[in-house]
Structures are given as structure tokens and as C-alpha cells.
Image: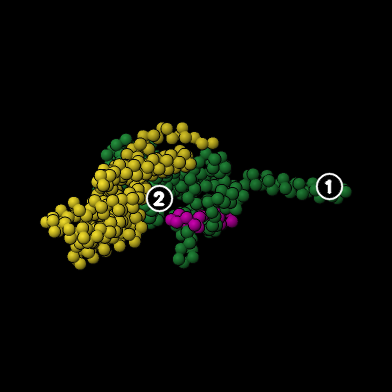
Chain colours: A yellow, B green
Amino acid sequence: MLYFSDLLQYSDVFFSGLMTTVLLTVLTTFLGIALGTSCAAIRQYGNKASQSVVAVYVEIIRNTPFIVQLFFIFFGLPSLGMKLSPWEASMIALTINLGAYSTEIIRAGLGSISKGQMEAAKVLGLSFCQTLTRVIFTPAFEKIYPALTSQCIIVMLGSAVISQISVEDLTYAANLVQSRNFRAFESYFVTALLYLGLSILLRFAFNTVGKRLFAYRSTQ
Amino acid sequence: MKRFIKLVSKAMIIIAGFSVFNATADVLQDIQGRKLIRIAVPQDFPPFGSIGTDLKPQGIDVDMANYIADEMGVKIEIVPVTSANRIPYLQTKKVDLVISSLGKNPEREKAIDFSTPYAPFFLGVFGSKDVEVTKIEDLAGKIVGVTRGSVEDLELEKHAPKSVNVRRFEDNNTTLTAYLSGQVNLIATGNLVATEIAKRQPQRAPESKFMLKDSPCYIGMAEGEVALQAKVNELINKALASGKLNNISMEWLKAPLPKGFGV
């Protein structure tokens, strides 16, 4: 027997959890991609020193588990005098995590743009920044857009881990409800559906944005 | 046939005699008669009872057992038990007393008798010394760490004011880490957990602020042993008055007895 009606009295818990997850996902997606874009540009066009700094950052983050990064920021940093709230800690952890992965993805996009584009822009008298924003970024992002979308969804799903440091996200809501009424199947089933819905929405949002960003294609 | 009937009737008389003797027997007199008291203690539940590095049992319950035997002026036989078999040991008269972090509940009260409490065992809110909290209403607006789904979590939810910011963690260790790293300055947990923190990090030893749920430990004895019960209660009260109980608590729990203990 299943008792989904037992979850009804906790609908506000699920709702506020859902909102926390959505808000965190939106914020970290913007911040993470911004961080990734800057790091990718540095890695592609920067000098040797800055390239290696970015390389160290990317390798450290990509080769350690997310939960360890999160625990380090939340439980470890206070010993160095840096006490962050659960919210701040997870924002930072999620952003640097997405930043590192998207750096590699975006760098691949930048690398795929032929040198001729760069040279043509220079000849036309565009500055380096203008070249990046007006010539390079759009086709580069278009190439890696599906991979970037997937990475953002992975980070959104991975954000379930932040419930471990008591951020009241969707997974926290599920765990809390489950610890109160012991309806494990029902709680996690509903939560899985909500995550699925979120993933579909996020993909849809990315597609919509993508259509506008890469609209120049349709005029060709 | 006649001889057989005689034998049976003799046997029955002897058995009847035994049961009459048993019914009137007083365990306290037995103990004083044989100059030996048999006490059941745990051996796998520190700090109440465990095996020390010298392979001897140690802990609150062991200290308490030795104290009782000393005061009665009899030798002691320590009988190690588990939490599952401590009451059967008492019911089958294998031991005279059970001092084994035994809590009171209605089912147990039907089976055995209890003394007054001798050691604290409670769920409460603990925190660093600089946090001023003395009752549950004081938690309003404060951050409290707790292990999700634990009894203390449910108690907190039931009684604490709505404005308290409860941070729930996955397991006891994460809750401890949150307290030790300073992410929370108050935690709701058991007094044994608080002792564990005090042992590991004396400079951040949490102070007991108030109780959420009190379930102290009692000494168990067979039902109807009024004389024994009175004697044990007298010894516990004496130890409470002389500060002996508090010393035991300080030694093993790293904290004084809670206010109003045993009253």
C-alpha cells in the first residue's frame, strides 16, 4: 500500500525545498559559466603563469569528489577563520565546481575556432576583447552548447549533496519528510519526479536561450 | 510401588520446602549471609561499563557496583551482561543487582523493581559557554544543530519556539563536526555524545543548557525485595549527599550531575 496522501501535509516543505534548489541552480549556473568562460579564455589566450594557475584549479576540482570540496569549505575553512553559512558554502562550492568543468568544455569550444577568425578580426581593427565577444564566443559556445547544458544539469542534480550541510533544498525536504513519516518510497518518488521535472525545465530553458543566442544561423 | 509413592511424596515435600524457603528468603539477608554480592554490569557500553587496557571492567556502573559492595561490607562478583540479557539474569536470580545503565519504562517496571537514579542519561541542548540559554524558549532566533530524525530532533520540533533555526545533519558525526568547527554553537544531543566531545576537544567542551528528555539510569533488582531496595536507595542517597555520585559523573561523563538530579 502506498500513502501519497501522507505527503500532503508536507507540501510546503517540498515547495520551499524546490525553490531553494531552483534558486541555487539559477545562481550557480550564471556564476559558474561566467567563471568557466573567464578561466577558459585565460587558458586559451593567457600567459604561461596564469594558464598554469587555471590548470591547477581545474585539475584540483575535477579530480576530487564534490562532497569533499563542500565539506572542506563548510567544516574545514572555519579553522582558518572563514566561517560561511550553509547557503554561502554551497553557493561557492557549486560555483567553483561548475566553473572548473565548464572551463574545460568552453576551452574546447574556443579551440575549435580557426585561427583565421582571430586574424581576420585583427585585420578589421577589432580589439582583443571585441574579437572575443563579437567574433569568437558565439560560434564557440554554439559548438559546446549541448555539453554545457548537460554539465549544468549535472550540477543541479549534484546539488542534492548540499542537504548534508543542512541547506534546506529539495533532497533535505525529502529526507526530513522521510524521517518524520517513514514513507521512504513516497517521499523519494515524489522528489525524483520533481528533479526530473527540473531537469526537463532547465534543458528547455537552455534550448530557448540557445535559439536566441545562435539565431544568426537561421539567416544563413 | 509403595516405595515409589513414598519417594515421590518425600521429593514433593522437599520441593515444597524449597519454595517456601525461597518465598520468604530475603536477597539482602542472602547477600549478608554469603558475604558476597553478585552485580551485573555492561562490558560493551562505555563510559558505563567496558574493558579497560588492564583487562578489568571499568566505568560508571563498575564504580557504582564497587561502591555498593564496599558500603555493604561484602565481596563483589562482577557479572558481565549485555543489554538484552541483563533483566533475565535478574529474574533467574543469577545476580542480585543489575547496574547496567538501566532506564525505567512501564514494561520493565512490571518485571523488576528499581532504585532511585544513580547516573544521568538525557537528551538535551548543549553549547559553548558564551551562549546564554537556560530554557527552551531562549532558543528563539538561535541556530541549533541536530541529527535529522533522531529523538532529540523530534523533541525539538515539538517543544522549541518556531523562530529557532534548526540545522539538521545527516548523522551524529556530522552534527559533532558542525559543533566542533564552530558552524553551530548549540547542539541537541545525548549527554554521552557531549561527553565524547569533551574528551576529544576539552577546549570546546559543551555545557549542558537544559534537558529535552530525561531518562536517568536506575539500579534494577528482583521484584518485591523491599529490604534490598531500601538499602540500595539509602546508599545512593548517601553517595549523592557526599558528592560521590557527582565525582563519578565528573570522572566518566566529564560533566557534573544535572541540577536537581535524584530529587
Q: Chain of mark 1?
A: B
**Residue lying furthest right in this view?**
B1
Looking at the image, the residue that sits furthest to the front is: A220
- Which of the two marks, 1 or 2, is nearer to us in this view? 2
* Snapshot quadrant of residue A26: top left
Q: CA distance from mark 1 to mark 2?
A: 68 Å
Lateral position of residue B26 relative to residue B116, left or right: right
Q: What residue appears at the point 49 percent right and 35 percent down from the top-left corner?
A: A3
Mark 2 belongs to which amino acid? Asp
Q: Badge 1: few (under 14), some or many (20 or more) residues near its Cα, within 10 Å? A: few
The disc labelled 1 sits on which kind of residue? Ile
Query: Which residue matches tag 2?
Result: B171
Residue A30 percent coordinates (x, y): 25, 47
Task: Say which residue label 1 marks.
Answer: B5
At horizontal 22% and vertical 55% (from top left) the residue drawn is A136
Instruction: Give the answer, above or below, for where A62 lies relative to B116.
Output: below
The segment highlighted magenta reads B30-49
- Residue A141 on the magenta span: no
x%, y% of residue A97? 30, 54
Chain letter of mark 2 equals B
